[in-house]
Image: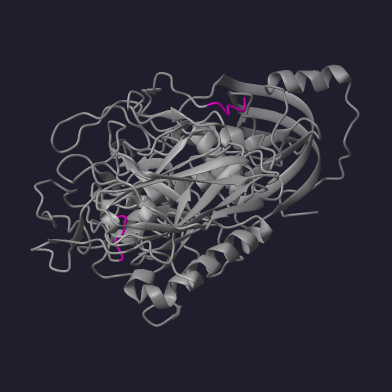
Amino acid sequence: MHHAGFSVFGLARAQWPAVLAAAVLVACGGGDESSSSTASASPSASPHAAAPLARSAGPLASPAATTPTVLPPTTFSLATPDRVTVGSIVLNGMRYNDVVVTWGQLLAGGLDAPRTSYNSFDPGTFRATLPKVQVGDTTYTNIVISVTGLVSVGSAAPVGPMIPNDPLFGDQWHLLNTGQAGPNGTPGLAGEDLRTTMAWNYVTGTGIRIAVVDDGLDITHEDFKVVPGKSWDYRVDAYGDPSSATGSHGTSCGALAAAQGQNGIGVTGVAFNASVVGYNLLAANIDQFGAGAVVKDLADNHIYTNSYGAPDGTGQAFASGQAWRDAIDTGTASGRGGKGAIYTWAAGNGAPSDRSDHDGQANYQGVFAVGSLNDQGKRSSYSEPGSNILVMGYGGESCDTHTMTSADIMGAGGYNNGATSQTAEAYSDYQGQPNYTRCINGTSSATPEVAGITALLLEMNPALGWRDVRAILARTARKNDPTNPGWVTNGGGLGVNHEYGFGAADAAAAVAAAGTWVNFPAQKTATAAQAAPALIGSTATPLVSTVALGGSGISKLEFVDVTVDANLPDFGTADITLTSPSGTVSTLTTPHQCRDLSDSSNPKTVACGNSLQGGFRFGVVRLMDEPADGTWTLRVGDQASGSTLTAWSIKAYGH
């Protein structure tokens, strides 16, 4: 294989003495490496605007480094044709710079886009993978060479935070919280962030494609890597420009996931080397196009991030449509070559009226429901609790306190016109920088952040199935707000909380786990039902109904569907819980008011209606890793009288 200025030169791999091989391993950190690219180690519907698998509840890390990280390039010179200078490489927790090696064979290379983020070395094969090699004025990509010897190492140091050179990174407290204050002057809790800066030493989302399903995406934005010609404009139902002249929601969400990093411009995305496409579903009829949007270009998209859902603040239950559920099932079965597309979904901004349990999309077993934290690591006041919440990202509170810094549509439209506040809130946006904003919040913000973390995992280990990704996020999540009384340990040994799911998403821990992860076996399902009608009791003395599940073969649950069919005239008076065989209680609904928000200036309290009649499906993820077999208990109480439980059933998913 030959490229101009970078050839094999006929060199064969030499048989070096064992002592030299040992020296290479010692100088380069040694140890086993991952085979991946790295190393060891409401637009309405309501825009929701080592291998450490153990969860960490210890002190929050508070890295102080804010100086941008500069990595030397990897270079090859015809003056020394038997040598390559590897600019930087991470092995076993150490970063080595300017590592000069001799090489024997060029095994791969080209000029296409890099497929991995960083240089890596496999001591089992003595092969180095180099995403970019600078040869004079030309940069070659995806180079694989056989390493025959070590000449020198310029410097070595323990891996530290990777700090991008993007000018607004310092305001992105969700990426690195050093105690930055918002417009109200209140500092954030240092260390309360996504832990991305350590993860970025290994992966940055290179080679991963994220579809932003929203109100639009500014595909001309200076800070995006957009796949040309692959965005979809639902206004004409064809490939085209999904941009909006005024709506910035999708652009801001997309940037939180994957704004380009280390380009000296604007902001940094969680997966700052991932590529994006935009689908402006919310600019069209969601009922008509919603199912198609989540499988569009399924063969090419790895992740679909969805920051919208049922109307917020109504208290009502909204079932998902069969066509949409079928589409999600198709995506998880067929996406990514059978490994499954990943769907991140906003949990909802309707608290305290709403629970995410009531949203038939956010509570579906094929999606990852994401809630929002503020800069203190506590649940954002609007973020809906639920038994379906997987993990938390960050959305902050309101624009006059502390929200997210992200991209805005280019020019004076969107959230920031570069001169004056675009909202009624008293806050100061970026003056003279209309392409960026400090005012995007909600579970809308948290959701693409977790999509970005997912992109990091898929670069680290492309073989991960979608169920594996869900489990990694849960098992590595960090126990935020540790004194909150809602924390319990489920029967699988995982900490969980209705407000927080399994906790704050932790990019560094998740990436480390992904590198050595062994994929789950095929998923099993099992069902059990109770069809004997019974009178529902009061909330003080609820009806207790049980079903027995046996012989399922499921030792570790992944998800549970609970379908409740009840003649309950006002859903808002009900209190329903599910208790697993291991004793973990999952709240499905609590007494609450419903509101008619059709006139936003005059909201009205209304009856919630008989939402459970005919059967409503709830989704529960908080029982992950528990065994499925045993007695399941449903408790149903009603503040009113005369209601009846007609039937109920469970469907357990697991392995």
Q: How many marks do you count on the picture? A: 0
Name the foreground residue: 295 vs 156.
295
- Residue 505 in percent (x, y) is at 44, 37
The quadrant of the picture occupied by the C terminus is top right
Residue 273 placed where, x, y %? 50, 49
Is residue 195 rendered to the left or right of residue 531? left
Q: Quadrant of the N terminus?
A: bottom right
The image shows residue 111, relative to residue 7, as above or below, that is below
Side (left or right) of 542 relative to 157: left
Q: x, y (%) of residue 172?
A: 32, 39
Is residue 117 at all visible to an observer of this figure? no
Check residue 52 for magenta coloring.
yes
Which residue reaches farthest bottom?
236
Residue 444 vs 299, above or below: the answer is above
Query: What is the magenta range?
Result: 45-54
Q: Does the magenta stretch include residue 202?
A: no
Q: Residue at x 29, y 60 (%)?
A: 316
Q: Main secondary structure of the magenta part?
A: loop
**Residue in the image at 70% along x and 31% along y:** 33
- Which of the two residues, 84 or 518, is positioned nearer the viewer here? 518
Query: In the figure, residue 16 lies in which quadrant?
Result: top right
Nearest to the observer: residue 649 or residue 41:
649
Q: Can residue 65 be seen in this view?
A: yes
Q: Point out residue 383 in the picture as x, y percentages from the top left corner.
A: 29, 46
Q: In which quarter of the image is residue 403?
A: top left
Give the colouring mode of the picture.
one colour
Left or right position of 435 against 332: left
Residue at (18, 46) in percent of width and height = 399
